[in-house]
Image: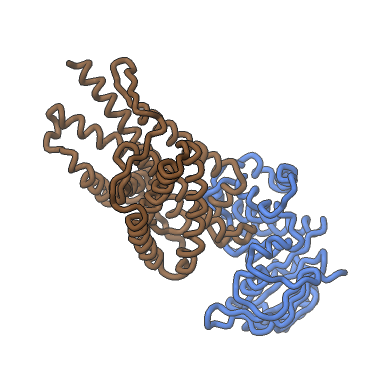
Amino acid sequence: MLAAAFSDFMQQVVSGLASGGIYALLALALVIIHRSTGVINFAQGEMALLSTYIAWTLTFNHGWSYWPAFVATLAISFAGGIGIHRVVIRPVERGSLLRIVIVTIGLLVAINGFVVWQWSGEPQQLQSPFGTETYDIGGVVVSAHDIGTIAVAVGIVLLLWGLFQFTKVGLALRATAVNPEEARLVGVRVTWMLALGWGLAALLGAVAGMLTAPTVGLDPNMMAAVLIYAFAAAVLGGVDSPIGAVVGGLLIGVLLNLLSYLSQYGAFDWFTEELRLPMALLVILGVLLVRPQGIFGRPAVKRV
Amino acid sequence: MKTLLELDSVAARYGPVQALHDVSLVVREGEVVAVLGANGAGKTTTLRAISGTVARSGAIELDGRQLKGGPEAAARSGIAHVPEGRGTFVDLTVAENLRLGAYTSRSRSVRADTKRIAEYFPWMAERGGQRAGTLSGGEQQMLALGRALMSRPRLLLLDEPSLGLAPMIVREFFRVVGQLNEEGLTVLVVEQDARIALRASQRAYVLEVGRVALTGTSDELRDDESVRRSYLGY
């Protein structure tokens, strides 16, 4: 009984890490844009949704196999993110932040409408590239898709970290986030760096969407809940901290699964699956009240 | 001496506020030129007009070529601007700040340049991993200077480097600037502290409400009792 409870526990942790990895990727996308422009991109989830439909079209309608479609979708999303910044965001970038926020909400509605118009609201199935097998590792049953999801999330996070830490363009991206005016003085083309940030965010979202679809099914509402979890992850980790986004994402994924787990064993027996989303909102609210800068954020200090 | 920088009837405005009316000045290669004047005379705006961070009109030429575009373009044509109030990237490390200074240079000389800078400021090599925001004010000003040098500038613009620093540190700062100048660096420095600036420069311009009121060699200005009293306030 105890052994069964433990392997059950481990199973929940692994699948929590997998969904948490997805939240982490989307939270990272939110953080990248927030750091450079100071706004929360409400369209982040729908951008990911559009990317996922593109991947689905490539595999389903055009017969591509998964990985070529994956790479092509990343490239299209990256270019699309840059395009969105140049065409939609840049014209409203000067002036109040509220204008950009409203534009991202408009973008959310527009992309969702476009997706329904183009692909209808019918749920579609995107195959998992990792297959449907499960493995029994010392009594803990884990699915290939969960393991693959964790591996891809870790790989993407490491690549991104390397980009920011060790490349010239990464340094310029960080400099732009810290102090755009100074960055221009040393010769950094700041508007391009902002566009690049949108491109990277769109790419991260695409990965998150393509990893989400195989388990929950592809439909126009797929990313709505994921975006809320990503918000919670970003707020929990600190909305200006990339590390925070990753840790926050994993924590949210695992915590929600552990609540389900505990409710099965009597504790928190009021908890049902329908309460997952409200729990995420509770996390957002709690963090904002208790520690607004999140786990890894530094308190905002206004320079005079 | 060859003219490196020439401003001809330059005006500049912040929205509806005209900050510069008519400024003409010349900086020759190898000189240290000071721009003096009271608060609001247009000293900082003059530098900002040169590096393109303010809307401007009139002609600004570097080495006979018209300067156009924003600060990215100015940085690419060899102007290094150290803005008022230090201007380091506080969240980045000392080494990263220096690397950003070399952002526009294509050469693989970043490492060699970092070494050269460490000869002036040995602590920068030892504390390369430290966050710039944790440095003292004087160290941040030195780092801003070091970062400017990393771009191998043809012209260095310094905006109020003495602001908020202890006299000893200001002296040290200008000693390094003097040394760099002897090695051939051309400098245009804006200072509120006329006494220091006139000692460190060969020529100076005095601004008054956005116009050049007076110009001469630094020695002449320093020795002229009436100039000192009416314009420089000491």
Q: Quadrant of residue B202?
A: bottom right
A173 shown above or below B61? above
Percent of width and height locating residue B113: 73, 46
Q: Which residue is drawn at 37% across and 55% down?
A: A118
For chain B, the rendered hue is blue
For chain A, the rendered hue is brown
Q: In this view, does B118 lie to the left or right of A300?
A: right
Q: Which residue is drawn at 40% across and 53% down?
A: A47
Query: Quadrant where the N terminus of chain A lies?
Result: top left
Q: Quadrant of residue A233?
A: top left
Q: Is residue A178 something that shows in the picture?
A: no
Q: Nearer the viewer, residue A109 or B234?
A: A109
Percent of width and height locating residue B81: 66, 63
Q: Nearer the viewer, residue A122 or B129?
A: A122
Q: Nearer the viewer, residue A205 or B149?
A: A205
Q: Nearer the viewer, residue B39 or A110?
A: A110
Q: Residue at x 70, y 52 (%)?
A: B150
Q: Which residue is drawn at 58% across and 83% down?
A: B18
In this view, the residue farthest toward the right is: B1
Q: How many numbered marks, from 0 up?
A: 0
